[in-house]
Image: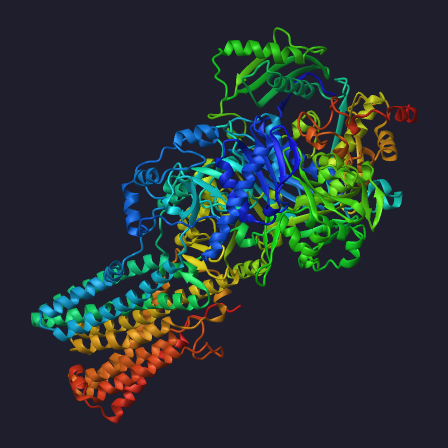
Amino acid sequence: MRKDFVFTSHSVTDGHPDKLCDQISDAIVDRFLQQDSQASVVAECAISQAIVFLAVQFGANLLIDIPNIARNVINQVGYTGPNFSGKTCTALTSIQELPLDTQDRFDEDALSDEEMDRIKVRNNANCFGFACDQTPSLMPLPIHLAHKLSRALSLARIKGTVPYLSPDGKTQVGVEYRDGRPHRIQSIVIQYCPSEDYNLNLSKKRIQEELTETVVRPAFDNEPVAPDHKTRIYIRKIYYGHGCGPTAHSGLTGRKTAVDTYGEYARQSGSALSGKDPRRTDRIGAYAARYAAKNIVAAGLARECEVQITYSIGLSAPASIQVETFGTGKVEEERLAKAIMKHFPLRPAEIIRKFRLRKLPREVKGGFYRKLAAYGQVGRTDIGIPWERGDMADLLREELL
Amino acid sequence: MLRVISTVPGRVRFKVPELYRSRDLKYFLETHLLKSDTITDFKANELTGSLLVRFKHETPTDRIAQEITDLIQKFSEENHNNRKNGQPSSLVKRKRLKQEDISKRKLRQLLQDSGQQPSKPWHQLSTDEVLKLVGSDPHKGLPSREAEKRLKQYGPNILPEEAARSSFQILMDQFLTVPVGLLAAAAGLSLVTGGVVDAIAIMTVVGINAVLGFVTESQSEKTIHSLKNLVRPMAIVVRDGETKEIGAEYLVPGDIILLRPGHYVPADGRIIHAERLTIDESALTGESVPILKTPNPIKDDQIPINDMVNICFMGTLVTGGQGVAVVVATGQFTEMGKIHALIGEAENTKTPMERELDTLGTKLVMASSILCVGVFGLGILRGNSFLYMLKTSLSLAVAAVPEGLPTVATTTLALGIKKMRENHILIRTMNAVEALGAVQVFCMDKTGTITENRMTVVELYTGNKSITLKKMGTEISISWNKALDDPAFTEEAATLIIAVLCNESELIENGETPRLNGTPTENALIDLAMKAGMDIKQVRKRFPLQKILYRSENRNWMASFHQMEHNQILVAVKGSPSEVVQLSTHQMIQGNLVELNDNSREDLLIQNERMAKYGLRNLATAYKIIEGPFNKDEADSYVKELIFTGIVGMADPVREEVPRFIEKLHRAGIKTVMITGDQAPTAYAIGRSINISGDEPLQILDSVSFSKLDKEARVSICSRVHVFARVSPANKLEIVEALKEAGYIVAMTGDGVNDSPALKAADLGVAMGATGTDVAREVADVIVEDDNLETLVMAVAQGRTINTNVKKSLHFLLATNMSEIMVSFIGNVAGWGQPLTEMQLLWINLVTDIFPGLALSMEPEHEEVMEKPPRNPNAPLVGESELKTWGREAGVMTATSLGAYFYGISRYGLGPRASTLSFLSLTASQLLHCLSCRSDDTTIFSHETLPPNPHLNLALWGTFALQGVAMFIPGLRSLLGISRLGLLDMAVVGAASTAPILINEALKPKGDKK
């Protein structure tokens, strides 16, 4: 039982170099899947000093213009200035084409149950999913708020309310818990970087006021736990030495896994999520685990729930499942685990089919994975994410209560 | 006679039977109609015999008709007269300038005295403004006097050439090396001290060297310069109201030039009239698709050359239509001239071997000087006479310097050049040969080097199936007779027929090989049809052309209307697939018409995308048959509800020999890099198909602003990249320089003007002979005459062989010289008299060192020369390990020679007999050592045999013979101080000569044999 403590999570805007790389990697995945839904692809991206390094391994029956995708993402995120933009950056692409592996090329919709059993896991993996009732989206409060703040920061720039911001920014929220429940906001940190293309002659105080007004206030609209007069609010300019974004600090795919998931409130796997196709269990397992955990909490069977799935190479079904409810469970954890095994998609082919992971990039306008790559891959309510649906809650409730 | 076809106010279309297929009349009409006050615009089409004229509203049509009739009359009279006088019936008066053609030197003088040409944003100004600024009249052109004046003011339209090296310069260069310097000093000293013979002997060697070098270098310079195009570029210009053809060098700003297909643009000009004028600017921009030109001004001020569609550039080729331009820049003020200037800025480089031989020479000179001084001093201290010691130490110095060295290097390289010339590789400098042997990275320009620079149809998608064409269309078999009777016979036939009919390329059949005159795309289609067995002329005759609807801004397709039997009209459409698909309602599949719905349309578009992804340029074909007669003015209304027949995918094919070439380079340890202006996926597809990355994953660098990168980043990235995509010409130079900074020896191939700076900066610049431009050839180090890349591999092998051969010669020369030094030195220092007299030393040096050394440098190519990586350019030719080995070999020879000496002393005491023994032993063992130097890996004991070297055999036998002669001719014998020898003495000499080679071969370090 967690008692009194302060917990802090952070989030970044979509222009932060690490997140930018995540988005580029996932945009590449989207593109491949859009045209060949059975493609396998691993895309890694690194950015430094206006050079984009792309390493892509793929097995597909088509070619895509990889540097062009990276450039489009960079432009769309908002880097269009003279120092760094999609048009002027240099792209070094290392491409390795893999032979089309017939084992991985299957149509998940057409498989029977036995055939699904034949699609095996290729590597050992631990997958964690978490849900708690601290917010309506069933996510821990700190990361939820951090995302709201970073979105507001980005929105302020896009809308033109605060025109001197560059796409690069970072937010941190510290929440004070009492008796395991969020009590108050202990601290808020907003780190912004003024764009070089702007002649900024506002005073620091003025900027702080402006950002408080346009970023902090809207983020806490309708939030039960809001800053009070004792909350430490820091709005600071990040000073890197020269410029913002990739010209100032470098980025790499998969370095913001905490931002992608639960803000370190729950356990998570060390593997990155972005840049991988749906055949990768270390990615889709995380989604499956979240699906299970969320439905358990949505069904009222626990207030806090962590689902841990272990996959083992050569098997198709998980090697084991653990459910941890931190003492808030209304039902024994073994029963919950059994229910999950029975009703939830856990085998790789099943997960792909249930969440339509190979078909979504074609169906969602502007790509699917690309959108996941910023502001969280779980716990989002702005886009229709299959694993965020609480459609199994009733079933669980009936069965277990 | 003239007939009016249609008329609206201000516009009339005539049918002029005389115009049909008469290019000459067309030109004639154009030039004269330009001058007319009433006529504002016109379009003459000799294919249809129609003339479209726009004129001032008030003028009655009859008057226009009369004007034209008069012109036609004038034309036929002129023609008639010309033919009577035996002149060709061409209207373009080939009038040369009245004064004598100005000589080249005078042109250069004019160039030097000329002033600046003002540079203005010509593309932004309207045609009237431009004409006013340059002070020119579009109808009359410049008056000749004004042209002369401007010629003096602005200089002739030529680019400053690189002056060739004069013979004197070449001769002088032979003498300006350090070893020669020392030898000359030694000779001088000898002369001063009375050793005339010595001095003569030394200077003879220097002389031989100089002559050899001079002959070979001047020979190659001559060859290279003979490559330059001797044909003078001409221009069609309007002066004094008349059209004439003059040498392009006389053009000045303000001249009115006429642009015709198949001619090079002679100077930079602002277009003032264009009739579907298209120009191939690939020599300047690398873009092989011709650009459509227009006379309209362009608003933006800073635009790249590719976008200046109202300017024509010097050195580019007119491919279609025609036009008129006013010259705005000539000579070095043109775009091509500016690139030419860049060439001057890129530095020239010295090859590693040259540098090393220089250092070696210097080091040896220093070492020998020290030795000299040392021996001299020691001798004096011992009490020997000044003169005696001087002579001795001088001869020691001469012994220390391998005189044969400069000769060997020069001769080897010269012979290499000659051999390569026999294989169609032209070498411009001696250094290029070395660079060939040391090259580590090969940069290839995609267009023209890796690809053939020629559009070819590679895929045909018809009736929902796709045919890949590897053999240029011979895979398609169509029974043409049937097809012509019913175009709906098969979709392949239909596609090809449409492609040929809706096509403006002309098939010119004079002589044996038919030529195609048109855009690359349309030529490719005709080519395909021909290879599939179609008789183009027959088809075009069968369906005579009635009208063409051209592509335009909003219309990405072209339609042509043809007469069929039974008063029907065939509408043939070809163009951008997405648009043609939208216009079609049916598709032909297996000869049947199938209706198109949204899904099938989408499928067609996906096919199009698939083909486009592989870098193909796609055109779709469709047709319709309508009942005639049809209203030509409403032609575009008929183009709908078409029957879709297929998509044709074209690409610039990869040359067949390229993958093999790359594999050979990889086996020889040379990295390959491709440079292209294509987008990344096309570059990837091509790079993969030629396996440019070998075993590694393919790395592509896609960059527009390469120069903005940090220098270190540039250098480290460059060395890992296999393909540079979206590269502009300026980037090529940056890439070459970055690779050089990374420490590589870089070879670069190119054929356009824009490649020149990169070619010059590379360690080895390679230009293609037949397709390359003059500028590229002038600047390159190597020219591949037959455009065959595999010849280059042979050249690299030859270059490497030459390198190793020079090393072998060095090996021989140094080892033998070291043995001479050791013998004399030890003898002198230890006070054992003179094992070798000065004359003997000189004899050894001059006679026995040059020819075997030379012969070694002509060692034939060993098999494994291309199976090993290139030698490390940073590793010296003569390094520590070499010195140790060679020192050891020299030591063995010294030991046996001194052994014979001691035997001699013990038997005969100090004197000539003893020194004869050491002299003969040393000479013989040195000659045999030559055999050991043939290879670093094989020994005389091993089973592998080396390819025979007849020169070496000749040299050895010859020198032995010479030795023998020396022993028997009295005069020579006394000069050399050789005395009679007994049998036992001969035996000792024999033993002392053969022992070293046996010992040295046995001790030869064995390398890894794979």
Q: Is residue B544 visible?
A: yes
Q: Is residue B720 above or below residue A262?
A: below
Taking the view exactly as shown, the residue that stands out farthest to the bottom is B983
B726 vs B472, left or right, is left
x then y, percent, for residue B592: 85, 48
Q: Quadrant of residue B533?
A: bottom right
Q: Is residue B739 visible?
A: no
Q: Is residue B786 above or below residue B103?
A: below
x then y, percent, for residue B959: 29, 81
Q: On the rendered image, what quadrant is the N terminus of chain B found in?
A: top right
Residue at (39% x, 39% y) in the render: B240
Return the residue nearer the eye: B945 or B1005: B945
x then y, percent, for residue B94: 42, 50
* Colour mode of the rendering: rainbow
Total marks placed: 0
Q: Quadrant of residue B196?
A: bottom left
Taking the view exactly as shown, the residue that stands out farthest to the top is A229
A157 vs B352, left or right, is right
Return the residue nearer the eye: B389 or B709: B709
B470 vs B370, left or right, is right
x then y, percent, for residue B539: 71, 54
Q: Is residue B963 above or below residue B857?
A: below
